[in-house]
Amino acid sequence: MRPDVQPSASHFINGAPVEDTTGAPLGVVFPATGERIARLHEATPAVIEQALAGAQAAQKEWAAMSGRMRGRVLIRAAGIIRERNRELSVLETLDTGKPLSETLVADAASGADALEYFGGLAGGLTGEHIPLGGGPGGDFAYTIREPLGLCVGIGAWNYPTQIACWKAAPALACGNAMVFKPSELTPLGALKLAEILHEAGLPPGLFNVVQGGGDVGAALVSDPRVAKISLTGSVPTGRRVYEMAAAGMKHATMELGGKSPLIVFDDADPEDAVSAAILGNFYSAGQVCSNGTRVFVQGGIKEAFLERLARRLRGAVMGDPLDEATSFGPMISEGQLAIVLAHIARGKEEGARLVTGGRRAERPGFFLEPTVFADVTDDMTIAREEIFGPVMSVLDFTDEDEVIARANATQYGLAGGVFTRDLARGHRVVAALEAGTTWINTYNLTPVEMPFGGVKISGIGRENGHAAIAHYSRLKSVYVGMGGVDAPF
Ligand code: NDP
């Protein structure tokens, strides 16, 4: 029996569910069947105002608490999420269509990791002492680490719960308040997170969820009370949001799209390289920003790689995402499926060799077969544009310098990976890659301890790791004069 996922209200503000049925209706569809499973409403201007005003009012008291006390709330929330992992994973599966076999390990669990990690850091957030000479009793400076104030988080639909946690955890740890807008396609996970944070003791007003599309996002981003925006989304949206942030001189973190290279040298373990290419192209039906969608394979290993890849893909189990035996789910929506099918048609037109897949599956919902193109060249559209679906492009290469130059010949710079048994080469290649997040002999692992983010048009700022603290706090410098004050006259 499928659980009822209709929330009691569309939004969560000031510690309580809030409804305003005058907002435009927002249907939630289970991508595996196309059925509507919940009905919500977009935030009206009154709802947006309530969220922003409530967050602003609550923030000062939260910032005045000790970091350790703030951290305790986050760590408690992490515990509740872990206890309820299965229920939250089923919800995430219904919201996104991703197989339960994935959501059980990658979504709420990764959100809990973030709450626990930043909860732990919260008590240790400090400025620094800067001696300025003169020995004991001489002048010195110190810095005070302050929260930014009111932060806005805007999420994409591929990892709704993880994205909400990756933004809320460091924001709250640093003493900020957050108003979060999920993607209109996946509004459910963030509401649960809000409930859980409050159950864990978060005071009302500090984490608020408002629903809606780009207009609601834009209203939040452009509000003068907002000090920081963190967006996960596409490059075109990132450009618009970054421009609005710039107009108000706001802090911004942009986690945007990519077209990342995965480079497989002849000496790589072929089975591991294939595993990484599968994870980096077909997990979450390929809807992952850091995917290694340009798989560069050196001549000597190419046949072994393609043969193993074809064999392994036959093991993919497409089916009901709620069945834990399913390992490959649907795309998020009919619209995204159409975009990906158009890319596949373009790949064929431009002369890429379709090795497997390429068609919509004959079943309800938005399923697309895992698709592999070989003999892809750098100029083809499928090698240049982000597809955001289960489509892998395999490109040939001969030597190291060549592949580095080709891997970097893109405006994107989110991620990249290299497979080789020669570790000196592995380090040399990732050092040369123009990418924010890289892997050697693995792919797409994003533990919360490791900073994550892009360079070039893939974004600015970093999520996760200690690095995220700098993006949710600011420094005040204090110069302390310990002697007299000299003046020229
Ligand atoms: P979109 O850019 O379409 O949307 C992202 C979010 O921004 C949504 O909540 C959207 O609202 C909102 N939005 C749209 N227009 C505006 C606006 N003018 N002002 C404020 N907010 C706005 O991305 P998708 O949801 O389609 O997600 C896919 C993209 O996200 C891919 O490019 C992918 O690479 C990227 N991504 C990046 C990640 C990273 O960490 N680097 C991780 C995951 C995805 P709505 O959609 O509800 O209208």
Image (cartoon, grey):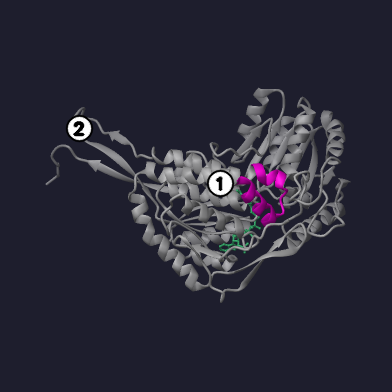
**Mark 1 to mark 2 CA distance (whole Å):** 50 Å
The residue where tag 1 is placed is 81
The residue where tag 2 is placed is 138
Q: Position of residue 79 (x, y in %)?
A: 52, 42
**Residue labelled 1 has its Cβ within 8 Å of some atom of ligand 1:** no
Q: Position of residue 41 (x, y in %)?
A: 59, 70
Q: Is residue 58 left or right of residue 20?
A: left
Residue 103: in magenta span: yes
Q: Main secondary structure of the magenta part?
A: helix
Q: Is residue 58 left or right of residue 378?
A: left
Q: Is residue 171 above or below residue 243?
A: above
Residue 453 seen from this side:
no
Q: Which amino acid, mark 2?
A: Gly
Q: Is residue 415 above or below residue 268?
A: below
Q: Position of residue 107 (x, y in %)?
A: 62, 46
Q: Do callouts 1 and 2 mark residues in contact (Cβ within 8 Å)?
A: no
Q: Which amino acid, mark 1?
A: Ile
Q: Position of residue 201 (x, y in %)?
A: 43, 51
Q: Residue at x 61, y 51 (%)?
A: 256
Q: Quadrant of residue 361?
A: bottom right
- As rendered, which of 299 and 64 lies closer to the eye? 64
Residue 449 tag number: none
Residue 417: in magenta span: no
- As rendered, which of 16 and 154 lies closer to the eye? 16
Crowd rating for badge 1 (residues with CA inside 10 Å; few <14, some 14–19, many 20+): many
Number of marks in picture? 2
Q: Which residues are magenta?
A: 85-105
Q: Residue at x 74, y 49 (%)?
A: 285
